[in-house]
Amino acid sequence: MLAHCPSASAQRQQPSPEALQRILDRLDSLEKQNETLLKEIHDLRQELSGTQASPPLREQVEVVDQRTKDLAQTKVSSSHRYPVSLTGMFLFDATQSGNPTLERGPYGITGGTGASLRQSIIGLDFYGPHIFGDGQIHGSLAMDFFSGTQDNVLRIRRGVVSFDWRRRSITFGQDKPLIAPLQPTSFARVGIPPLSGAGNLWLWLPQTKFEERISIGANTELKAQAEILETAENYASPSLSLQTAVAPARPAAEARLELQQSWNDQPRLALGFGAHTSTSHAYGRSIPSRVISADFKYQPKDWLQFSGTVLHGENFANLGGLGPGITVHEYGVVPVRASAGWVQIALPLTSRLTFDVYAGRQLNAPNDLTANAPLRSLMYAGNILYRVAPNVVLGFEGGRSRVTYLNGIPFSADRYDATVAYLF
């Protein structure tokens, strides 16, 4: 009886043939799943090694590689142990212009036929210490080789030091006028920005600016800005005899309000309204400079963007408008009244390909001019920009400039540029 009990227990614990078959089937299924997983892992390794990388994956690798290089640059530090980043652009520009004298600006002829690296930019971005109120100091400096003189190879374009807090900033340095912060996109016209004298107030002027940022709801922000700057009166007076009688620089005040609306976590609409006031001195007389402005940026779709600026006032060539800002009549020294503006349509069709079309003009009041003074200007251009790499842009741009003088004589020029830009 005792010998019979263990045998009976062992017989009860032995699995049936059906259970054994289910176990074998399960093991076979797991083995097939393991083989499938191993194959997928092998394929993924091949993709990561680049042997079977798709274009989107290669683009991601390029972006990561560029960011790695950027991080390596930010490791450079100043003598005070704060990080400094080297920035800028190597720009090769091959130009053909039918009337290069029309492209003459304050730094020489910008058109002509030939190739140049003068529009390349070298810059520094630096990040200072944290300050009271949870603020921080930032700064930047950008220079190019467009001065056109042997004594000054580098020319300062823009340089600022900014004390930034969450809701306000105080900035010292040199920049565009506050009332005209935008400009068209162009890799062909960098030394003198596009639409200079045709609606774009471009001169980089010494200034001190204050900005207050106010949130209005979750997706709307209001910026209130005010600045004191120094005008360039010699640019407002092309006549040599008048330049000798004009104070070369004058203090000015500007103010601007900007309303920015965002949706889907992207800024989509920005409207700005500005005003400028200063007083020029010529021949012992005080000549007012008054300007009002409006600017906008609107992006209704990811592939469609609009931007532009409109201006109206008197004597604003001292900010980069079409001269003259001041003329001398037999009845006295007068400011030149004018209206100006520009608009751009940008089509970023893909992450690599963008089309830009822009146009601008300025119209001076004929009663304020002498016979040999410019009455109106018109410029329009279009470009194609293609990124062969995240930081390498190939471009082609064509445009026309036209200036008509009060005596009825027009001057026009077609210009074509092929550019290669390496951004760093």
Image: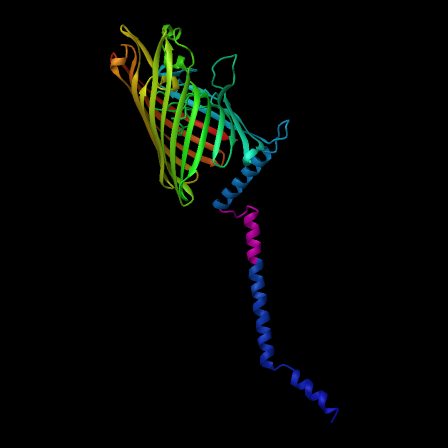
Residue 178: give x, y in percent of width and height: 41, 26
Which residue is depicted at the point 75% across and 91% down?
A: 3
Dividing the picture into quadrants, the one containing residue 177 is: top left
Residue pushed farthest right?
Answer: 2
In the picture, measured across the screen, residue 366 lies left or right of residue 227, that is: left
How many numbered badges does the structure rendering display?
Answer: 0
What span is in magenta?
Answer: 39-54
Which residue is depicted at the point 52% across and 48% down?
A: 52
Q: Report the magenta stretch's main SS.
A: helix
Q: Please tell me which residue lies in front, 318 or 135.
A: 135
Dividing the picture into quadrants, the one containing residue 296 is: top left
Colour setting? rainbow
| Relative to 308, residue 220 above or below | below
Residue 401: give x, y in percent of width and height: 32, 21
Which residue is depicted at the point 54% across and 35% down?
A: 133
| Relative to 410, residue 65 above or below | below
Q: Quadrant of the N terminus?
A: bottom right
Residue 326: give x, y in percent of width and height: 33, 12
- Judge whether residue 262 is colored magenta: no
- Judge whether residue 51 is colored magenta: yes
Residue pushed farthest front?
Answer: 133
Q: Please tell me which residue lies in front, 145 or 25.
A: 145
Residue 163: give x, y in percent of width and height: 52, 30
User: Residue 323, can we see it?
Assistant: no
User: Residue 138, can we see it?
Assistant: yes
In the picture, measured across the screen, residue 116 lies left or right of residue 137, that is: left
Which residue is depicted at the point 56% across and 64% down?
A: 33
